[in-house]
Amino acid sequence: MKKRIVKIVICVVLLAATLFLLQKLLVPKYATTNEEGILSSEYYANAGNNDVLFIGDCEVYTNFSPVKLWRDYGITSYIRGTPQQLTWQSYYMLEDTLRYETPKVVVFNVLAMKYAEPQNEAYNRLTLDGMKWSTTKLDAVKASMTDEETVASYILPLLRFHSRWSELTSEDFNYLFKTEKLSHNGYLMRVDAKPAGQVPDPVPLPDYTIGPKCWEYLDKIRETCDKNGIRLILIKAPSLYPAWYDQWEKQIEDYAGKYGLEYINFLELADELEMDYNTDTYDAGLHLNLSGAEKMSAWFGKYLSEKCGVEDRRSDAALAAEWAEREAFYEYMKEAQYKQLREEGAVTRYK
Amino acid sequence: MEEFMNILRDIRPDVDFENCTTLIDDKILDSFDIISIITELNSQMDVAVPADQIIPENFNSAQALWAMVEKLLDE
Amino acid sequence: MSFVSLGFLLFLLILFILYYALPRRFQWALLLAGSLVFYAFASPKYLIYIAVTALSTWFAGKLIHDAYAARDAFLKDTPDITKEEKKSCKEAAKKKGRSIMVCCLILNLGILAVCKYTDFAIGTINSLFGTDIAFLRFALPMGISFYTFQSMGYIIDVSRGKYQAELNPARFALFVTFFPQLVQGPISRFDQLSQTLYSEHAFDAQKITQGAWRAVWGFFKKMVVADRLVPVVTGIAQNPDKYAGGYVLALVFFYTIQLYADFTGGIDITIGVAKMFGVDLAENFERPFFSKNITEFWRRWHITMGTWFKDYIFYPVSVSKWMLKVSKWSRAKLGTQLGKRVPVYLSTILVWLATGIWHGASWNFVVWGLLNCLVIIISQELEPLYAKFHEKCAFSNTRGWDIFQMFRTFWLMAFLRVLDVYRNVPLTFRMVPTIFSSKGWSEMFSGGMLKFGLEVRDYIIVAIALVIFLIVGILQGKKPVAEQLAEKPLVPRYLIVWILIIVILVFGAYGIGYDATQFIYNQF
C-alpha cells in the first residue's frame, strides 16, 4: 500500500513537472519579440530604495530615464509602466510596489484616463502576466479582464498560450530558463529618431466624459498615496499623438484643483523642455527617444529635487555601486543601438 | 405446440428454435421478427401479446415463448 | 455549466471530496444537491420545468403504486372470489394505472412539445398557408428531451407493473436530475440505474481511476477533435453559395467526425464521471462505425434512445389492437407475404418519424428520420438477395468485405447526417449532388480548406486522432480499454494517461480564438 502511494505521488509530481516545463516553453518570452512584455516582471529584481515611482502606459516607460535622474540629481526611481496600462492597472502596480517599498513620490501619467473599460486582451497579458502572484495581482486581473478572459488562464497561462505550440521559435528554447534584461529601471531605450512631421488632426469625439471606473481608481491611487505619505504628481507626457483633448485636460485640471494635486502637462512645456519633435521622437511623435527622454528627465529631475525635496543619494556608497552598474548597462545599450544605426541603418534590437 | 413451432419456423427457417436459448441475448431475433411472431400468434392462435410482455426473458427461447403463450391463453 | 470548463472541474472536485468524506448514507442526497446546483448554474430559470416533471412523475408513480397495492390487498384478503371477479379486479386496477400514466404522459410530453415544437409548428403553418403568425420563442430548458423521456419510460414501466414505483420524492428527483446525464443522456432506465444510484459507495480506487480515465478520453475526443472541427463545419454549411462540390464532401466527412467525437466524447465524460461516484450508467455507444449495415449501426449508436423508442413506441404500436386489425385486413387484401409486412413497416415509419422530430424541431430532421427508415426498409427487402449473394460469392465472407461494408455504412450515415447542418431540406438536396461536379475541388486543395481558421497542422492533428480512435476502437472490441489499461504495469499505464492529459491541454481547441465549444446535443 505504502509503495503504491509513493508511486502515485511520483506520477503526480512528474505530471506537474511536465506541465510546468510545458508552460515555461509555451508562454511568450518577450526577449527578442514584443519586448515590452518583459517590463512588468523586471521590477522585482530592482525593488527597494526607489524614491520615485512612475506608473502609466508607454508615455512613462519611453519618456523618462531613471539613469539620467540618478546621474544629474542622485534621484533613485523606477518606472512601472506597461503597454496601454489602464488606470486600474496603474493603481494595482502602485499597490504591488507598496508590498516591496514605499516611494516618496508617485508620478501618474493621465493618458489612460481616456479608457473607461478594459480594452485589449493582449495588452492585459503584457501588463499582468509579469506580476508576481499576490492578492493584488488577482484583483488586478479581475479588474482588467475582457469578456473572453478567465482568471484561470492567468493562474495557468498554459491555458491561454497552449496553441503557441506551432509557433515556437528558437527564442522560446533559448530563454526557457533565463530572461533578457532590457530596461533601465523600467525605461525602454531607443536612440533612433523619426521626425514628427504632420500629425493628424484630432477627430471630434461624441463624448469626452472620463469614465467613472477611471475616477474610481484615480481616487484609489490618491487615497493610497495620502495614506502612505506619498506625494502624488499627475502628468501628461509631451507626445503629439494620440491626441489629448482640451475637454480631458479640463477635467483633469479640475480634479487636481479639487484635491490640491500637482498636475504637469508637458505638452505645454515643450518649448521650456527644448523639445525638438524632429530629433527627439523615434516614431513621429508618439514616443520620445533617448534624447527626448533625457530632456524630460533633466527638467523633471530639477522639479523633483527642488520642488519636492527628493534627496540626492549619490553619497550612499552601496547605492552608488548599484547605480554604477546600471549606468554601465545604459551606456552599453546606447552604444549598441548607435552601432546598429551606423552599420544597419536602423535600430531593430534593443541590445 | 406443433402449430406454434411451425409459426416460428415459418418466420425464421434458419434458426434452431428447438435448442437455442439466447434468441434475444445473441441478437438472433430482431425487432422485425418479434413483431412478426406476435402478429402470427394473434392471427393463427388468437393470442394477444401485450407490449409489456415483450421482454428478453419471454423471447429468449421457444420454451419461454410457449410458456408466455400458455399464460396468456389461461388469463 | 459545460463539461469543458474549469468551473465544471472545480464543481466535480468539491462534490467528489464531499461524497467520499461524508457518511455514506448521505451520498445520494449529496448527489441530488449537486445535481440541482449543476442545473441551477446552467439555467436557474428552468429549474421549475425539471421540478414539474420530476414531481408530477413521482406523484403519478405513487398513485399507481397505491392503486396496485389496493388491488393486491383486496386479492389477498378475499381469496375465495371467483376467477371472473379476480380478473375484473385486476382489469380495474390496470385501467386505473393506465389512465394515471396517460395523464402523466400528456402533461410532460405536452410541456416538451410546447417548449420545443411550438415555433416549428407555427413556421410550418406560416409557410403552408402564407400566414404571418409570430414565433413564440419558448426557451428550451437544458436536457428537457432527455429527462422527459427518462421519466416517461419510468411511468410506463410502473404502470406495466415492471417494477415498484419510487415513493420517496427526493430519491426520485435524483433519478430525473442526476447531473452527469442531464446534458445529453444516456436515457437511463429506473430499474438499471437505481441499482447503483442510491446505494452506499465505498472509496473504490480502481473504479474511480477507471472512471477518471474514461472522462479524460472523452475530453480528448471533444476538445482535440470535435471542437477543432467546428469552424470548418459551420463555415461550409453556412455559406453554401461559396462552398460547393468538394467542400460538401469535406463537410459530410468532417461533420460526421465532429458529431461522433462530440457525442461519444460527451458520453465518455458522463459515464466516467458517474463511475467516479460509483454509479453505473448504461452504455450509449458500442463502436458504431464498426457496423456493417444501417440497422446494426442504429443498434450501436445512441443505444439508449433506440431502445427507448423500441420499447415504448415500436412494440406497443406494433402489437396494439388497431395494428393487429390492420394486419388482418392487409393480409386479406394484399396476401400473406405482402400483408404481414404492413404492420411492421407502419410501426417502423412511425418510430423514425418520432426519432427525427426528437432530434430537432425542423423538417431537416423529419426528412433525415424518414430517409433512415427508407434505407432500413430497403435493406430488409433486399435481405433474400443478400443471402443469395453470400451463397454465391466466396469473397463476401472475407475480412476485406467486412471492411467494405463498414466503410459503406459510414458514408451512408454521413450523407444522411448532413441534413443536420444545412439550413433546410431543399438546400441540402441541392448541395449534395454538387459533389459530383467539378466545383470547389481544385480550390479546396490550393488553400481553400485553410480559410476556416484551421491550418494544415490542425488537419494533421485530426488525422492522427482518427488513427488513435481506430486503434482504440479495435482494442475496445476485445474488452473495455479502461480494463485493459488497468492490467498494464503502473508506469506505462500512467504514462499513457499522462500523455493524454498533456495532449488535451496543448492540442485542445479551447480558449481564446476557439470559442465554439458548446455541446451540439445540448438541448435535445
Image (tube, grey):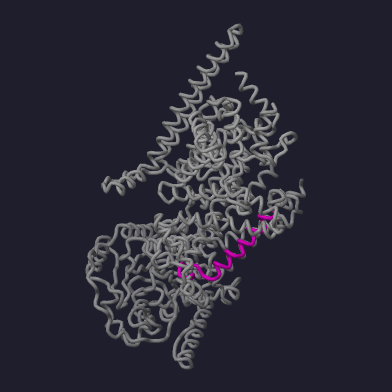
Judge whether C167 appears above or below A221 on screen: above
Q: Residue C145 placed where, x, y %?
A: 47, 41
Does C296 sit left or right of C524 as displayed? right
Q: Is residue C482 visible?
A: yes
C451 in magenta: yes
| Viewer-side residue, C361 vs A105 | C361
C231 in magenta: no
| Viewer-side residue, A102 vs C151 | C151
Prevailing SS of the magenta stretch: helix
Judge whether C397 appears above or below B17 on screen: below
Does C353 sit left or right of A178 as displayed? left
User: How many marks on residues?
Assistant: 0
Q: Residue at x 38, y 80 (%)?
A: A293
Q: Residue A287 placed where, x, y %?
A: 36, 79
The boundaries of the magenta stretch are C449-475
Judge whether C438 appears above or below C114 on screen: below
| Viewer-side residue, A237 vs C380 | C380
Q: Residue at x 24, y 71 (%)?
A: A245
Q: Residue B23 placed where, x, y %?
A: 68, 37
Judge whether B6 appears above or below A294 on screen: above
| Viewer-side residue, C483 vs C190 | C190
Q: Residue C130 placed where, x, y %?
A: 27, 48
Q: Is residue A16 visible?
A: no
